[in-house]
């Protein structure tokens, strides 16, 4: 049975990746059981990754339903048979995801594409590479409440995989700015932004009613020359992390900007 709100969020261990320097990256996602409620859980007792935490780069804002391959936590080459544990407590329920280097959990590009969107097995799809995202300007900024902050990212891609369906905006490269940490109710984007991770929800959540389809304007946020630009305005002081996400439907890349918002 589906619920609009009041349910918990389940952290998910997606698998591990081997890094060129001999270290490893543990990859996590989540499942927000709510159909409508966006959940905010600050880093701390109710949202922690250990050992080495509680802050290991995890999100604090959880949009409804499933999100795969959301963040990575590096572990040393000698991590061995130890475990990394992400703990989330939401609406009175505590859930944990246990990450380890067991061989059956290994990830590569093709496994990621298959899990993300059932891509990677047709002609040419296995050659697909991750989109490239570059933040224009510093990764840490300060702005006052009510003061507009311009954000620009440059995005490029290899053009793979080729769109499969008539509704090409559902399977093409898309990009958008989103609130990764902080309360999105206090952030306004101009022009409005769309999280490319949400485009699968319209067809992948049959139990949830009222999930809006992908808006046509979402496909136009990324300019022809690969620029993703918006202006963010904050209504409350605090620290926010804004993420530029590029997603070619099979693979995605994210880069963040940390914004310290002060009183006027």
Image (tube, rainbow, N blue to C red):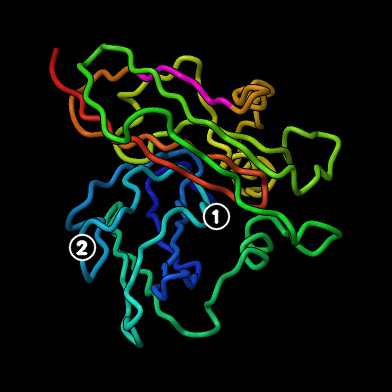
In the image, residue 63 above or below residue 15: above
Residue 244 x, y percent position in the rendering? 47, 36
| Disc 1 to disc 2, C-alpha distance | 34 Å
Q: Can you tell which mark lies on residue 185?
A: none
**Residue toward you, 171 or 159:** 159
Residue depicted at x 73% and y 32%: 169
Q: Earlier in the sequence, mark 1 or mark 2?
A: 1
Residue depicted at x 39% and y 51%: 7
Residue 63 x, y percent position in the rendering? 45, 42
Residue 231 covered by magenta stretch: yes
Residue depicted at x 63% and y 63%: 109
Considering the image in quadrants, where does the N terminus appear? bottom right
Considering the image in quadrants, where does the C terminus appear? top left
Residue 4 covered by magenta stretch: no
Please, what is the dominant secondary structure of the magenta stretch?
strand
User: Crowdedness of circle 1 by 10 Å Cα count: few (<14), some, many (20+)?
Assistant: few
In the image, taking residue 55 as reference, residue 131 lies left or right, namely right
- For residue 239, which quarter of the picture? top left
**Residue toward you, 126 or 181:** 126
Residue 201 x, y percent position in the rendering? 62, 44
Q: Which residues are magenta?
A: 227-232
Residue 30 x, y percent position in the rendering? 45, 57
Numbered disc 1: secondary structure? loop
Q: Which residue is mark 2?
A: 53
In the image, taking residue 71 as reference, residue 86 lies left or right, namely left
Q: Is residue 41 visible?
A: yes
Residue depicted at x 46% and y 53%: 70
Q: In the displayed image of the protein, which residue is found farthest to the left?
A: 263
Q: Which residue is mark 1?
A: 1
């Amino acid at each position: 049975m589906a619920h609009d709100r009041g349910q918990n969020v389940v952290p998910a261990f997606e698998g591990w990746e081997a890094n060129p320097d001999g270290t490893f990256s543990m990859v996590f996602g989540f499942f927000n059981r709510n159909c409508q409620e966006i959940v905010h859980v600050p880093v701390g007792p109710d949202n922690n990754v250990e050992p080495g935490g509680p802050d290991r780069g995890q999100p604090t804002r959880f949009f409804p339903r499933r999100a795969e391959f959301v963040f990575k936590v590096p572990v040393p080459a000698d991590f061995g048979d130890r475990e990394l544990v992400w703990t989330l407590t939401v609406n009175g329920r505590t859930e944990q995801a246990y990450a380890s280097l067991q061989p059956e959990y290994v990830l590569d590009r093709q496994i990621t594409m298959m899990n993300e969107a059932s891509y990677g097995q047709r002609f040419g799809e296995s050659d697909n590479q991750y989109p490239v995202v570059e933040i224009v300007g510093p990764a840490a900024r300060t702005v006052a409440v009510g003061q507009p902050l311009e954000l620009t990212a440059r995005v490029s891609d290899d053009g793979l995989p080729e769109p499969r369906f008539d509704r090409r905006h559902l399977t093409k490269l898309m990009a958008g700015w989103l609130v990764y940490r902080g309360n999105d109710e206090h952030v306004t984007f101009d022009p409005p932004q769309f999280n490319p991770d949400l485009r699968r929800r319209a067809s992948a959540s049959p139990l949830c009613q009222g999930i809006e389809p992908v808006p046509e304007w979402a496909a136009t946020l990324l300019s022809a020359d690969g620029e993703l630009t918006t202006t963010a305005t904050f209504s409350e002081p605090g620290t926010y992390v804004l993420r530029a996400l590029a997603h070619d439907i099979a693979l995605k890349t994210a880069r963040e900007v940390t914004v310290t918002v002060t009183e006027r």
